[in-house]
Image: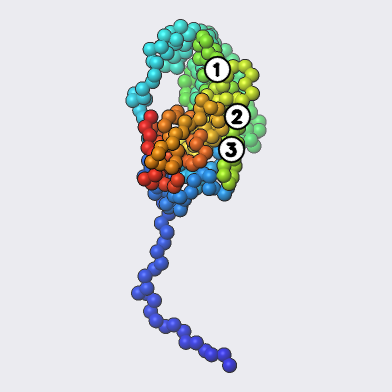
Amino acid sequence: MAKRTQPDLSDSSDKAPAPKQQCLQFEIPESISQWKKQAESLRVQNTSINQMETLQSGSRVVNEQHLSFRVVWPTCKSIKKIQIPNQAKAREILKKMAGFKNFLDHIADRNDDSPRHTLGTFQLVREAQIQAGNWMPPQPKEAQGQSQIFMSQPTPTGTRQRSMSAASHPSAVAASIASLESLGSNNDYHNQLWERTNDGQIVNEALLLFLRAFTINTLGSRCSWSSERLAFKIKYHRAEMESRRDGYLGLCGHDKNKEAFVILEAKGQGRTRKGAGMSVYKQESAEMVNWIMHDEKTPRQVPLGKRSESPGPVLKQFDLRSLLAFRGGVLFYSTRGTVYMPREGPCPSSPKCTKSEF
């Protein structure tokens, strides 16, 4: 015969609730202390990239994966605080560069005082910049009053584009024709600013044209810019990660190794530490990690040495591109110049970490 049990009628209101795991809202860390908080919140403080079972591609990096890179992004410095090397030499080169002064004047003036045909090598550069900025340049005086034809009329900020059904109405078509005929003399139209493009390809084209204009006008340059979407696919201990970039600076001519001295990533949106803009930080971090790991040539490997008092390798010399070439562990670095290399444990605060300044 089954035994009936008495229900528990005791008051459970005095019982302490079970502690809940606090989860911080994820944001891109700008310091090691912030990285620690984010990593502890997601319980990956002891997980390196070599321990990740799954790695998404560079454009789809998840939060845990980004923290395994051990990358911090400090606040950007003001342009006035950035010390640019060889400024005097650069100015001398730019003075001899045909069309460069007119190019700068055209950017500053935004008028017809510097017609684009005087920009020389920078004519296509300026055209691409205008397209990326998506604003209509003023027309020369001799062109004003003439009829112009546009494939599509830009929509000013705050104005919705008409639907296809509305545009197909006969009265709407007639109004469109009338507006096109009056564009040539409509100075207000030409002087309006339009929303910037969110197409990364247009931004990338403008950037590459700008950079190419300098390299082809620099004597003795053995490098050139390529728009090839160079892919780096790196096999880590447990998973593989692939990342592609929008262009790179490599050697002129045939280079079977496709060595990249500079990599490009162009976006139509800005970086943000929270929200949708975080993906830019994540993708750039993945590209930097894969790029450095891919570069295994002897001159660019991290020189490692041995110390009698330490069983692990010690980082002695390096450049920014080679920080992660050490395959025995993962470096913790920041763009501000501090690098932490764990000899054994992954925690950057471990006493078994070597700190180097550059």
Amino acid type, residue under disc 3 in the picture: Ile
Asked whether disc 3 touches disc 2, contact meaning CB atoms under 8 Å apart, the reply is no
Residue occupied by mark 3: 234
Residue 153 horizontal/vertical position (percent): 57, 26
Residue 213 horizontal/vertical position (percent): 53, 15
Count of marks placed on residues: 3
Residue 28 horizontal/vertical position (percent): 43, 42
Residue occupied by mark 1: 223
Cα–Cα span, label 3 and label 2? 13 Å
Residue 277 visible, this angle: no
- Which residue is at the far bottom? 1
Q: Nearer the viewer, residue 7 or 88?
A: 88
Residue occupied by mark 2: 230
Residue 165 horizontal/vertical position (percent): 64, 37
Q: Which of the two labelled residues, at mark 2 and mark 1, occupies the earlier sequence position?
A: 1
- Quadrant where the N terminus is found in the figure: bottom right
Q: How is the image coloured?
A: rainbow
Cα–Cα span, label 2 and label 1? 16 Å
Residue 7 visible, this angle: yes
The label nearer to you, 3 versus 2, is: 3
Q: Nearer the viewer, residue 353 or 185?
A: 353
Amino acid type, residue under disc 2 in the picture: Leu
Amino acid type, residue under disc 1 in the picture: Cys
